[in-house]
Every structure is written in structure tokens, then in C-alpha cells.
Amino acid sequence: MMQIILSICAVVLIFAVLSALFSKLDKKLRTKMYEEAKQAVAEIESLQAEIQQLRKQIGQAEKEKAEYIDNKMKAPDISDEECQKAIVDKLRQELDNKLKPAV
């Protein structure tokens, strides 16, 4: 009779220890998964910022291209260098106008 009680207590103790170990392991895994997810979100946000910056650059390049084509159509006898200089001058003027209120 005593041996049966001791066997039952041993089995209960083994299950308690295994439960505690699995609980600890589960907590570690969840923490690790949370950290990895947090890192992935940070990487995604960084990539989204880069994409936004590239979209702005593409928009600016398209604007410059349209301006270049417009200038070429208005005055086809103007050389490419003169046209590019005119675009650069206009962009500098726009930048100066944007910076003046900030100063």
C-alpha cells in the first residue's frame, strides 16, 4: 500500500517538474519570438522609410524630366547643357525660396 502511494507521489512529482520545465521553456520561446517580431517590425519600418524616400526621389526625377522635355519643346535649339543649367538654376531658386522662411 505504501509503495503504491510513493509511486503515485513520484509520478505527480515528475509531472510537476516537467510542467515547470515546459512552462519555463515556453516563456523563453515566447520572449525570443517577441524580440524577433519586434526586430522584424523595426526592419519593415526602416524599409518603408527608404521606399518613401525613393518615391520622393522618383517624383523629383520625373518632375525634372518633364521640365527638361518642356524646355526642349519650347526651345529646341537650346543645347542640353543650357537646358540642364536652366533646370538646376530653377531648382536652386525653389530651394532658396523654401529655406528663406526657415532662416
Image (tube, rainbow, N blue to C red):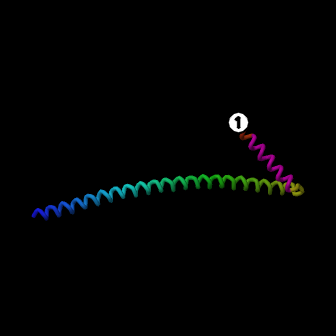
Q: Secondary structure at mark 1?
A: helix
Determine the main secondary structure of the stretch shown in magenta. Answer: helix
Q: Is residue 9 left or right of residue 23?
A: left
The amino acid pointed to by label 1 is Pro
Which quarter of the figure is the N terminus placed in?
bottom left
- Seen at 27% across and 58% down, the residue is 17
The quarter of the displayed image where residue 30 is located: bottom left
The quarter of the displayed image where residue 22 is located: bottom left
Inspect the magenta stretch and tell me whether residue 27 lies in it. no
Which of these two is toward me, 30 or 61?
30
Which quarter of the figure is the C terminus placed in?
top right
Q: Is residue 53 left or right of residue 76?
A: left
Q: In the rendering, at what x and y percent does residue 87 appear?
A: 80, 50
Which of these two is toward me, 1 or 65?
1
What crowding class fits label 1: few (fewer than 14 Cα within 10 Å), some (14-19), or many (20 or more)? few
- Mark 1 lies on residue: 101
Q: Is residue 57 left or right of residue 13?
A: right
- Seen at 24% across and 61% down, the residue is 14
- Seen at 59% across and 55% down, the residue is 47
- Seen at 86% across and 52% down, the residue is 82
Which of these two is toward me, 98 or 28?
28
Q: In the rendering, at what x and y percent does residue 43 appear?
A: 55, 55
Q: In the rendering, at what x and y percent does residue 33 appear?
A: 44, 57
Inspect the magenta stretch and tell me whether residue 95 lies in it. yes
Instruction: Please state the extent of the stretch shown in magenta in the rendering.
Output: 80-96
